[in-house]
Each structure stands twice: as structure tokens, then as C-alpha cells.
Amino acid sequence: MARNKIKRVSTILFLVFFLTGCKDAVNEVFNQGQYTDSDFLANYYSYYPEELRKNVYSTNETIIDIDVSDKTYSFLGGEAKEKALIPDYQEGLISKKELKEKFGIDLDENTVEEVLNNQLQRVSWYDYSKYYNLSDSNYGDSKINDSFKRGYFSKMTDGLINCFGFGAIARIQTDENGFGVLFKHELVEYTSFFVSLRGATNIDEGPTYNSDLEFRVSFYIEESASMQPSKVTFKMDLNEIYTDGSGNSNVIYFRLKDVLTQQQLPLLKRTTGFSFSFTLKEHVLLCPGGVVNTDTDYKFALMLYELMLPHSKWR
């Protein structure tokens, strides 16, 4: 299938901005226009707060291997109703009123089974992300919402789960080492996990190729009176992710109770930071057969659009 090449975005503004909304003693500084350069190689973002670099996190790490083949791993399609919305209602996370006002689903007129079987009434991940992204969810405290709207990482908390024509403004481009972020608030309740992403290269001509990678998301839990700092890493193999198709992205969504045991579920409590990294496992030109091609100057990147923890609560 033909894919559109990455849209290149240029800018002429070079004002200095400070990233706020994280606990780092030293704020990260960047220029407006940085990471949106027409030069693909100039857009890699690799910032890690110093707090997340502490060895104690790595020595106290729990790794959760997730098989996405039996989870939601798809294009940005219309299965959010079946995979997320109705299960949210059945677990008491959203009300009948909310279903009707936000998504046009009337459970006074239809049963849950009729709603699920109605193929004409689709709810896309675009629709779902409008209400349950980290910047706009209602945590009962506007300061919590506002904290997710600050800093460079706010690109991944605004509900823009694909380019939507915004190009580099909507995404974070990173290499295999990835990047990290710290928040002022801590996670206290959580139900599910969502991330949208795609691959990209600076190959300008010829056919496009999808890619395979190992993707890792880590949750960082602060030290407390009873616990040392800890880290929980979700590791998953992603096969055939969209690459070099700016109009296409992949969704990974799962309910945390489906991937964690009852003993593991509390491990994420008091999370204040995240990091993202990956290993490229297959690309026809850049990593054929799992071997890095050292004879090419072309480079691979992961484009990350959104992280959602729907119905999560923070303090």
C-alpha cells in the first residue's frame, strides 16, 4: 500500500521557551522551531530528566512482557466503542448521560448488545481521545489538567493521536534511546493504557516499508517512607508498524488489569514520570533480517503522538 511521505515543517521563529511542569531543578531550554526542522536528523528529541537517570530505578525494576497480538493493536480505526467505551461503561467509569451527550449512544433506547452490534454507529479512537486525553480529562482540579498542558511532552497529552495535518507540531521524534518526562503530580488510580505511534525514516524516494520493533514504556515511582524508588517497564513487540506514512499511525490499547496480576496492579501507584525507548528489529533497508545496515546513511525514528491513561486520577 502506498504511504504518504513525512510532511516537512519549517519555521522562522527562534524564541527561547522554558519547559515547565516537571520536577527537574533545571528546566530544559529549547528554541521555538527546534525539532520541527526540514532536516530529519535535527528533530530527534532525547531529553531525560536527571531524576530518571538514577541507578536505583534500574536496580528496582519490574519488566512486564505484553503480547499485543491479543490486545488492541491496530490502525486508528473505529473499534474504540467495542474495545474501550462500552467496557468503560460496564465498569462504571462513564455514565449513560456521558455516552449519549458525547458519543450519541442512547442506552435508554438500546441495550448494550444492540449498541455493540450496530456497525453503523462507530466510535473511533479520534472520538475517544477528545475526552480522555491527559490534558482535558476532569480530575477535579484544574491545576492537574493544566500541568499536562505544559512542556514539550504536552505534544503527547493533547488528544492529537495522529498528524492531522500538523506534522511535527503533533509528535515527538526519538531514536532508540528514547526520552523521559517528570510530572508535578502523581498517579493514584488507573484503568487502561493507550499510545499512538508510527515509524519514520529519511528515505525520500522509492517504496515505503513497514517495520518491526521492541517498544518499551517505563513508569517511574518516587521514593516513599516505605518504598525505594522503583520502575515498571512494559515491553512489547510491535510488528508491521506503519512507517513513512504521515496519515497512518498504530494504536496500542489495553486494560491494565488484563496485563498485570492482582499483586502487580498496585506497582504503578504514585507514578510521577515516564520514559519511552525502542529497539529496531526489522526494516527492509535499515535493519534487514534484524541486522543493522551500516552501509547506508538513512536513519530510523519513532514518532510518538499520544499517551493516554483514560479515567486515571492524580494528586
Image (cartoon, rainbow, N blue to C red):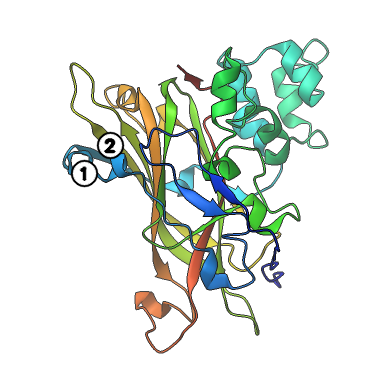
Q: Which residue is mark 2?
A: 231
Q: Amino acid at mark 2?
A: Lys
Residue 151, horizontal then vertical, whole percent: 54, 40
From mark 1 to mark 2, how far is it between C-alphas? 7 Å
Q: Give the x, y percent position of residue 40.
A: 57, 71
Residue 175 in which image quadrant: bottom left
In this rendering, the answer to whether 129 lies above or below 280 is above
Q: Dot 1: within a 10 Å radius of its alpha carbon, few (fewer than 14), some, or many (20 or more) residues?
A: some
Would you identify the image quadrant in which residue 49 lies?
A: top left
- Confirm or deny contact between disc 1 and disc 2 (CB under 8 A): yes
Q: Position of residue 95 (x, y in %)?
A: 68, 12
Q: Quadrant of residue 93?
A: top right
What is the secondary structure assignment of the residue under circle 2? strand
Quadrant position of the N terminus in the picture = bottom right
Residue 79 location in percent, x, y? 67, 39
Mark number displayed over residue 264: none
Callout 1: helix, strand or loop? Answer: helix
Q: Amino acid at mark 1?
A: Ser
User: Which residue lies under the disc numbered 1?
Assistant: 58
Number of residues whose C-alpha sits closer than 10 Å to that of mark 2, classed few (under 14), some (14–19) or many (20 or more):
many
Q: Residue at x 51, y 22 (%)?
A: 312
Q: From this view, report whether residue 173 is shown above or below residue 194.
A: below
> Residue extending furthest bottom?
295
The one of 197 and 74 positioned closer to us in this rendering: 197
Q: Nearer the viewer, residue 100 or 280?
A: 280
Camera sees residue 252 = no
**Residue shown at the point (56%, 67%) measured from the top left:** 200
Query: In the drawing, does residue 188 fall left or right of residue 79?
Result: left
Q: Decide which of 311, 29 is in the foreground and name it.
A: 29
